[in-house]
Amino acid sequence: MGMPLQRGTKGGSVPELPEVETMRRGVLGAISTTITEVHWPKSRFKPIQVTPRRNAFSRRVARRVIRAVERLGKRIVLRLDDENVIAFEPRMTGLLLTADPPDDDHVRLLLKLQGGSVSTLQFWDRRGLGTISLLTPAQLASRWGPEKVGPDALVVTVGELRQRLGRRQTAIKVALLDQASLAGIGNLYASEILHVALVHPELPCRRLSARQWKRVHAAMLSVLQEAIRYEGSTLSDGTYRTALNSAGSYQHHHRVYDREGQTCPTCARSAIRRIIQSQRSTFFCPRCQRKR
DNA sequence: CCCCAGTCCTGCGGGC
DNA sequence: TGCCCGCAGGACTGGG
């Protein structure tokens, strides 16, 4: 039983629902402010994708008032007084900050705001896979309407969840990541949720019993809500930060993610295993989460 | 429609 | 000591 005790090393938690919801709450102070300046800092890195082009974006958001700050799955949406929206998509390493960023090199956009408690809003992105978009209501609907983005994981009912995923042959862990079926879950929380639900990650969706769907749904809510209370997960590479550039602390409460070889905290007997599903790591306890 | 592999990008750790 | 390679995974795309 010489189980290797491994430490997660380059694990970098990515903004999923709890992290993006924490970002949203962190920038609520931008509501009712006016965008007075728009800056695109020069950088030695490849520029990130901005829609429309930067000049048009700057011209169209200048002097607009931010009416609301919303979350759409893993994206932050600022509703402007002309009905258009600014959408920030953090993807792997994007952050929305009201405080000083982790470094100046990776600031992609800086908005100066007037009239509220928040005077700057910055989009910071180390890897640069994130996107920034200014969209009309029609563009928003066609890109991220209900046909493209499923119901939010905090809002979906167990019936809806089962209706959307229940007939699929795909492994439950892979299906939970499909944003068109269910919005907000990413690789980290999928493993955590299935562990709490005591469901094996490789179980095909159509094989889950009604009881298991109930457990998955309940675990999804409890894990996501608990993670929001701890302001999300900041792993060893420290990438994810809140709007105030502080670390989240849910990583201290992870049960399986990035804990390969460590003893399962639920049964205290088996070692956490790591497998690859759809080219992504999945972590689970083979004792607590049985296939049959 | 369903499902999977490949692509984008930077930083970091391990191996040599 | 430094270089190279693999890995991290969200969203999208193209193919079977």
Image: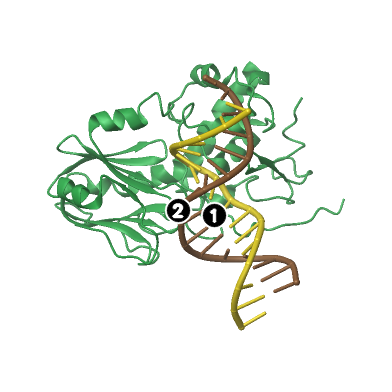
Chain colours: A green, B brown, C yellow
| Residue A219 seen by the camera | no
Give the structural element (helix, strand or loop) at label 1: loop
Q: CA distance from mark 1 to mark 2?
A: 9 Å
Count the numbered circles shown.
Answer: 2
Task: Give percent across and percent down for residue A213.
Answer: 60, 22
* Furthest-right residue in this view: A1
Figure quadrant of the C terminus of chain A: top right
Q: Circle 1 sits on which residue?
A: A12
**Relative to A263, does residue A197 appear above or below in the rendering?**
above
Q: Nearer the viewer, residue C2 or A135?
A: C2
Instruction: Estimate how packed mark 2 is, as few (under 14), some (14 to 19) or many (20 or more) residues with alpha carbons within 10 Å.
Output: many
**Relative to B14, does residue A216 appear above or below in the rendering?**
above
Q: Nearer the viewer, residue A61 or A11?
A: A61
Name the residue at 26% across, 59% down: A40
| Residue A216 falls left or right of residue A34 | right
Task: Give percent across and percent down for residue B3.
Answer: 61, 28
Q: Amino acid at mark 2?
A: Thr
| Residue A212 falls left or right of residue C11 | right
Question: Chain ID for label 2?
Answer: A
Name the residue at 54% across, 54% down: A12
Q: Are marks 1 and 2 in contact (CB under 8 Å)?
A: yes
Question: Chain ID for label 1?
Answer: A
Name the residue at 52% across, 22% down: A161
Q: Circle 2 sits on which residue?
A: A93
Name the residue at 41% across, 29% down: A149
Point out the tag, 1 or 2, that comes first from the N-terminus: 1
| Residue A234 falls left or right of residue A10 | left
Give the structural element (helix, strand or loop) at label 2: loop
Task: Give percent across and percent down for residue A121.
Answer: 27, 55
Instruction: Estimate how packed mark 1 is, as few (under 14), some (14 to 19) or many (20 or more) residues with alpha carbons within 10 Å.
Output: some
- Tell me which corner region of the image, top left, top right, bottom left or bottom right, holds residue A139: top left
